[in-house]
Image: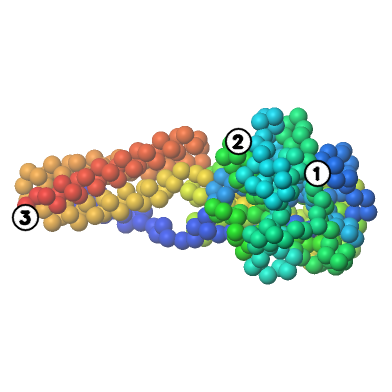
Amino acid sequence: MFSKRLCAVMGLLWVSVLGLSAAEFYTPPVISVPHVESVPVIDGQIGAEEWSKAAVLSDFILQGGAERPTLPTTVYVAYDAGAVYIGARLFDPTPQQLRVEADERDGAVEEDDCLALFVDTSGERRSYAQLVVNSIATQYDAMNGDKSEDFRWEAAAGISDNGWIVELALPFANNIAPKPGDTWILNVARNAPGVGEQSSWARVEEGIDQPENFGTLIFGGGAFRVTIDDPGALWLGENAAWISAQALHEVVLPPAEDMPANWTAKLNVRVMGRDKRGHYFDSVKQVIDQAEATQVAVPYIVKQDGLSTVTFSLTDLVGTVRWRSGPYPVSVPPVSLALRAAETALGKALVAWSQLPQGANKQVLDQQLGDLLKAWQHLDRRYQRREEMTAAELEGLLAQVEYVSQQTELAIQQMAQIPD
C-alpha cells in the first residue's frame, strides 16, 4: 500500500535542508599591490610592458553574486611613492556602440558605460570616495554621495578593437605613500548599459553602497600577480582550475632541512554550499617564480546543487593571504531541495489519507498516491546520477519533480473535501 511504501522511503531519505545559504556566505577579495619603479603613462593606451609588473584583480561578478558577466573586465593595480595606478581593459564586442553622454565633470557619468572606484583609505568601512570615468574620460567624484568635493586624480580613456581602456592615477594625500602592509578598502565596478550588466570585483547586492563587502588592498610586501586562466567547469563533481602566479618580489626559498618540499606559496580553493555537507577546501603548495608566471592546476569538488560559490586564494609561507578572488558562482538546478519538498508533500498526503474513512475514495487515492510515490522514487534514483547530467537535463528533472509536488498538493486538497 501507499502508506507502507512512503513510510519506508521517508525513514531512509529524510534529510534536513536547513543550513547556510551560499548566496549569503561571502569573504571579500584581497589584492597585494606591488611597489614599482617604472610607472605607466596615463594616456588611455595599455602598452605591452607598462602594466606587466602590476597585480591583477580577479574576475568581476554581477550584482547579487549569482552570475558572471558576459563582458569581462581586467584591472591592473600598482603604486610608487606618489600614487596608486589603475589600468583596466573593458571588453566589449561593439565598442562603437558604447553609451557616452556625460561630457562635463560630475555629470551623470555613472549612467554611461563607465568604470567606478570606491575607495576607503581609513579602513573603517563606513565612508568612501567614489571615482567614476566613462569612455571619453569624463570624471565624476564624490565623498559619500556628495559630489561638491573634488579630488586630485588623473584619468585617461581610449577605444580598442575589442572594447575600451581606462588608466587612472590616484595621488596620495600630502604626497605620503602608505607603508608596506598598510591597507585600503576598495571596490572596482563596471556599468555596461548596452547589455544591462552591472558587475564588480567585490560582490554587492542591488546598488553599490555596501562598503562592508568591499575588498582589501594591501600595499607592498609579498605581492603576487595572480590570474585565473580557467576556473574549471564550475559544475557538480570534480573540477580543476588553472591558475597562473608570479612573484612580484624577491623569492627566497626556505632551507630544505626546514621543509621537506620547497614552496613559496599555497594556492587554495574553498567551495561553500548551502550547508556544511557542501563545503570543500584544498590547497596546492608551489614554488612561485619571480622570472615568469607559474601555472598550477588546483582541483576542487562541488558537492551540492543550488547555489555554491568557489573562491581561490594565495597565501605565503607564514599563512598571510596575499591574494583572494571574489566568489565564482556555481548555479545548479536545485533538484535535491525539490525532491525533499515533494517528499514532505507525500508525507502530508499520507497523514491525510490515513484519516479518510474506508471506501471507494480511499482506494482510488491509494492508487493515485502510490503512483506519485513511484514517480518520486524514480526521479530520486535518476538524481543519484546527477554528475553525469547536463544543465538542461537537470532542469528537466527539476520540472518533473515539481510536477509530482503539484499533483500531491492537489490530492491533499481533494482529500480535504471528502466528508468524514
* Residue 66 in picture, x, y percent from top left: 54, 48
Cα distance in 3D space between marks 3 and 1 = 79 Å
Decide if residue 74 is in sight here. Answer: no
Structural crowding at the residue carrying mark 1, measured as other residues with C-alpha within 10 Å and reported as few (<14), some (14–19) or many (≥20)? many
Tell me which residue sits at (39%, 57%) in the image.
15
Which residue position holds label 2? 194
Decide if residue 217 is in sight here. Answer: yes
Name above or below for residue 14 compared with residue 295. Answer: below
* Residue 100 in picture, x, y percent from top left: 68, 38
* Viewer-proximal residue among 199 and 61: 199
Q: What mark, if any, has residue 156 been given in the picture?
A: 1
Tell me which residue sits at (87%, 49%) in the image.
53
Q: What mark, if any, has residue 420 been given in the picture?
A: 3
Element at label 1: strand
| Three-letter amino acid code of the residue under disc 1 | Ala
Mark 3–mark 1 contact, CB under 8 Å? no
Cα distance in 3D space between marks 3 and 2 = 62 Å
| Three-letter amino acid code of the residue under disc 2 | Gly
- Counting residues from the start of the chain, the first of labels 3 and 1 encountered is 1
Q: Nearer the viewer, mark 3 or mark 1?
A: 1
Tell me which residue sits at (20%, 46%) in the image.
411
Cα distance in 3D space between marks 2 and 1 = 22 Å
